[in-house]
Image: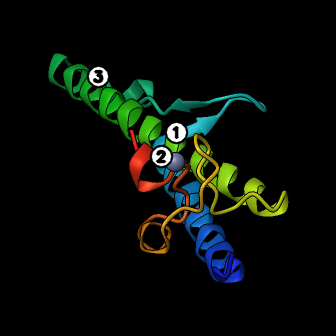
Amino acid sequence: MNIDIQKYKNILETELKRLESEILEVAEKEGDSTWEAKQLEEEDKSDRVDVANSIETYESNVSIAENLEREIIDIRHALEKIESDAFGTCEICQAEIEEERLDAKPESRTCEAHMN
Ligand SMILES: [Zn+2]
């Protein structure tokens, strides 16, 4: 394999930092476990409209946080593959993942044929 692992490592680490600061805007970590979406403070829920808005904000925070968390998991996983020399290998057929695919998405777990 002649791919530039260091290049992908830099991209993944930068992306991980960006996502981790982004998820802090919508969620907070409960101890060491999972992310919890933020809820508005009590005083913001003074009338019915505010309550509706607050539920809406909470629900959109939940889905944003879920998407970010999924990306964070994928990126951490890719960084672990770098550590164990498995980076760039399809997790289904063990073939090398196409370089264009890694360029577009360094955290790809599979080759083109096994995506989804
Ligand atoms: Zn494959």
Count all numbered tags in the image, as a single digit: 3
Element at label 3? helix
* Amino acid type of the residue tagged 1 in the rendering: Ala
Q: Rounded to the nearest whole Å, what is the CA distance between mark 3 and mark 2?
A: 20 Å
In front: label 3 or label 2: 2
- Provide the residue designation for mark 3: 55
Is 70 displayed left or right of 12 in the figure? left
Query: Which of pointers 3 and 2 lies earlier in the amino acid sequence?
Result: 3
Q: Amino acid at mark 3?
A: Ile
Q: Residue flagged by tag 2: what amino acid is it?
A: Leu
- Dot 1 beta carbon under 8 Å from ligand 1: no
Q: Residue at x 49, y 74 (%)?
A: 99
From this view, report whether residue 17 is shown above or below residue 64: below
Dot 1 or dot 3, earlier in sequence: 1
Would you say the residues marked 1 and 2 are in contact, meaning their CB atoms lie under 8 Å apart?
yes
* The image quarter in which residue 80 lies: bottom right
